[in-house]
Amino acid sequence: MIWISTAIGITFLIFEEKLMGGSFGLAIATSGLFFGIYLLVKGADYLVEGAVSIARRAGVSNLFIGLSLVAFGTSAPELAVSLTASAKGYGGVSISNVVGSNVANILLCLGLTALLTKVFVDESTFKIEIPFLLIVSVSFVAMLLRYSVPSVDWNDGIVLLGFFVIFLYYLYKMAKSDMETIEKDLNINTWKAVTMVILGFTGVTIGGEITVNTVVDIAEKLGLSRSLFALTVVAVGTSLPEMLTSITAAKKGHHGVSVGNIVGSNIMNILLIIGLSSIVGKKLTVDVEMYYVDMSFLLGSVILLWMMSYKRRLGKWQGSIFLTLYASFIFFIIERG
């Protein structure tokens, strides 16, 4: 079924412009929205199952898979949107997409996941990965706010990519350590697992693309602004893969994938996506007022996650706090316009 759905999704993307331009454009967009969400759900399911199988076959932890393979896959929509926006000269969209997505990943995605089921946090995530995300976030905010008009230059992008190399080295050391301590499950069919991961990646990427495009089309018909799109509609849309993957993983007990996916994705969003986008676009500039509030939510969400993870578990009350704060963030963005 996922094969057929993916083929339909690709066909929809090819003929999307013609479909949206017709008299039934809004109805088509709404149908596309539901289909995109379906692809996200099925893709997330395949991605988690395939990734966990690969982890067991290779003798690495679920956390490593969540921080690397799954995190990169679920960040694909953000990467596509941000690079396209920066290449077209919409630097503010690239930055706002990442900021909005990172806030949504923690407050909305993890908040909803914790509300639906208990989420357990690995010790290394609390002691190493989340603090590293905080350092990365602080560095990013410092780069942005050093100018009167928040912006990131191409040379800042090189620094961010340098941090990304450090993160990749850390992942390499983690994988090496895992393979020395975790027993391999040689009974797992490697090709089946890889196929599931590929189908899962394809599903979440195409599903995310369809969802974002149709939601933006619907929002444009309602007269919303581009900046509002990037921080809300596009950010939430590109965070849907992380959300569905984290919920699916947590419900199946793969908590390393669930939390690692969010933390790893946020790290990649700043280091890889902003790093590459700033080089492509030469300089990314934010064109909205009171951006320090967005930065406060960006840093505050990471600090709150770190504090809430002290007991290595996130439950309903933590999820409720996350979701309440996210609602406050959205309310502020809408009021600012």
Image (spheres, rainbow, N blue to C red):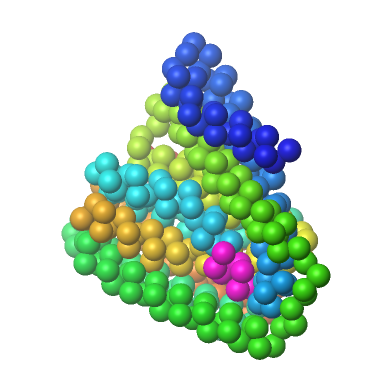
Q: Residue at x 44, y 24 (%)?
A: 17
Q: Quadrant of residue 189?
A: bottom right
For this orientation, the residue located farthest to the left is 148
Magenta span of residues:
63-69
In this rendering, position of residue 197 left or right of residue 134: right
In this rendering, position of residue 250 left or right of residue 102: right
Q: In which quarter of the image is residue 2?
A: top right
Q: Residue at x 43, y 60 (%)?
A: 269
Q: Quadrant of the C terminus?
A: top left
Q: Which residue is drawn at 66% across and 54% down?
A: 195
Q: Quadrant of the N terminus?
A: top right
Q: Which of 325 and 144 is in front in this view?
A: 144
Q: Nearer the viewer, residue 82 or 145?
A: 82
Q: Which of 1 and 103 is in front in this view?
A: 1
Q: Does the magenta stretch include residue 68?
A: yes
Predominant secondary structure, magenta span:
helix
Q: Nearer the viewer, residue 274 or 171?
A: 171
Q: Where residue 297 sits: x, y (%)? A: 44, 60
Q: Is residue 263 visible?
A: no
Q: Where residue 250 sits: x, y (%)? A: 72, 62
Q: Is residue 193 visible?
A: yes
Q: Residue at x 38, y 58 (%)?
A: 273
Q: Where residue 44 sits: x, y (%)? A: 66, 51
